[in-house]
Amino acid sequence: MSKKFIKCGKFFDGLNEVLRTNVNIVVEDDIIREVGEDVVCPEGAEVIDLSGLTVTPGLIDAHIHLDTLHHWLFDSSYLISDEMKTLNIVHNAEMALQGGFTTLRYIGSGLRTYGAIDARNAINDGVFPASRLIVSPHGMGISGGHSDSSSSIAGNFYLSEELEKQLNFMGNGVDFYKTYVRKEVKYGADFIKIMASGGFASPNDDPCDCQLDDDELRAIIDTAHRLNKTVTAHVYSAEIAKNLIRMGIDGIEHGSLIDEETCQMMLDNDVYLCCTFQPYQEAVHMDEEKLATKSPHFQRKLHKYVDQLRATRKLVVDKILEGKMTIGYGTDMVSVYECWECWREFHTWREEGIPALRTLRAATSVNAKILGLADQIGSIEPGKKADISAWHRDIENDIEAISECDFVMKEGVVYKNCCK
Ligand SMILES: [Zn+2]
């Protein structure tokens, strides 16, 4: 058995929003065994001295897309093979691990096959030094909708039609969606993701379009639940979100245009929100220079919805501060920053006035609950997996503090240690 004794400088356990000092941790193999001020070094243990750093649980990003190597390639991702995308997933998960994020919730992609599942399994087997992946392989949806990457070449009908035929996760009718949910589970999906509304990044739809019929939505949710899988939906508007909550959806991604009533329904029905602030930051705070880096349709839609985006942002920030709803930390960066720069959402939450430890609680124990893994990860407690990160900058006062990670342990294995 391998034993490690970790001496912490400052210490955040992922649950209580306080920084403690003089805490020590004992790790046996892949599990945390002891945590506390009085814990002494077991005989024969390897000592890891992080007394100059702030120690946190390994962080979790609950909304990430990993298929593209660089953000400027996103709009032409239809040119990239599934094999290359699978390699990109592994590479980006390696980069995220080096940044202190030990778990990533992979929230659907444009791969026709199951490369994300293979990547997850290879990482779990220890073949690659990368973040653990929790995978929904595809984001099911409609022709011309948010999951239809052939829309990006809609100016060329022939090419777009040929490409769309390859995108087997898009279709129509109850039978199609029941079959597809079962296939996702057959090939190893951890959860199911659907594109219930239009988006900002897709060219010819609108964020408030309802993109699936009620009978299709019901079929997806019921089929997944029968197979013990949760369902989350890409959705912006209050009306579509409320409709999904009534149908029994488990989570809402983005929710950037929801209202007070939606929040109350989410609270009453224990539906989580993964709010992904960062991609809409340029519109909410109208930074024309950064806005210009987005695609023309993204800019047009952001201008159209800017007032509602601002109102909902304020509402969701208030709900995070209130602390009753389950609101997770997710980056959703595809076209402006590299997808693995998971620290950027921390910067955005801090800019909104959310305290650092409230933000980090979202990125640890709250996200662990969203992933259904609260008994395994998201906090530094005896019995949990030994996922631990550490940082040299001032976590509480420096709003970019987690852009520089100094130490990463995942399941008891050290993947980065700048203190050596
Ligand atoms: Zn997304």
Image (tube, helix red, strand yellow):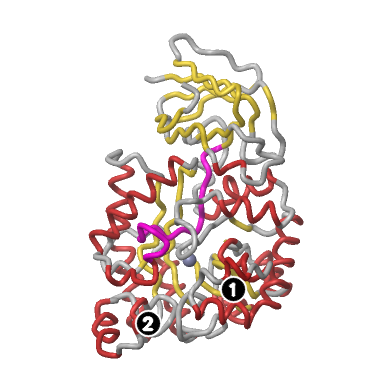
Q: Taking the image as drawn, is residue 244 in sight?
A: yes
Between 405 and 64, the residue placed more toward the observer is 405
In which image quadrant can residue 309 be found? bottom right
Which circle marks residue 245 in the picture? Answer: 1
Side of 114 relative to 143 (left or right): left
Side of 288 relative to 377 (left or right): right
Which region is colored magenta?
57-73
Rendered view: 107 above or below 200: above
What amino acid type is highlighted by mark number 2?
Answer: Ser
Residue 192 included in the magenta stretch of the image: no
Between 328 and 68, the residue placed more toward the observer is 68
Cα separation, mark 1 vs mark 2, equals 29 Å
Say whether marks 1 and 2 touch (CB < 8 Å). no
- Residue 208: x and y, percent? 57, 83
Q: Nearer the viewer, mark 1 or mark 2?
A: 2
Q: Taking the image as drawn, is residue 272 in sight?
A: no
Q: Residue at x 60, y 70 (%)?
A: 255
Side of 227 relative to 282 (left or right): left
Q: Residue at x 62, y 77 (%)?
A: 242
Outermost residue, bottom side: 157
Describe the element under mark 1 as helix, strand or loop. helix
Q: Which residue carries the number 2 mark?
A: 151
In which image quadrant can residue 270 be found? bottom right
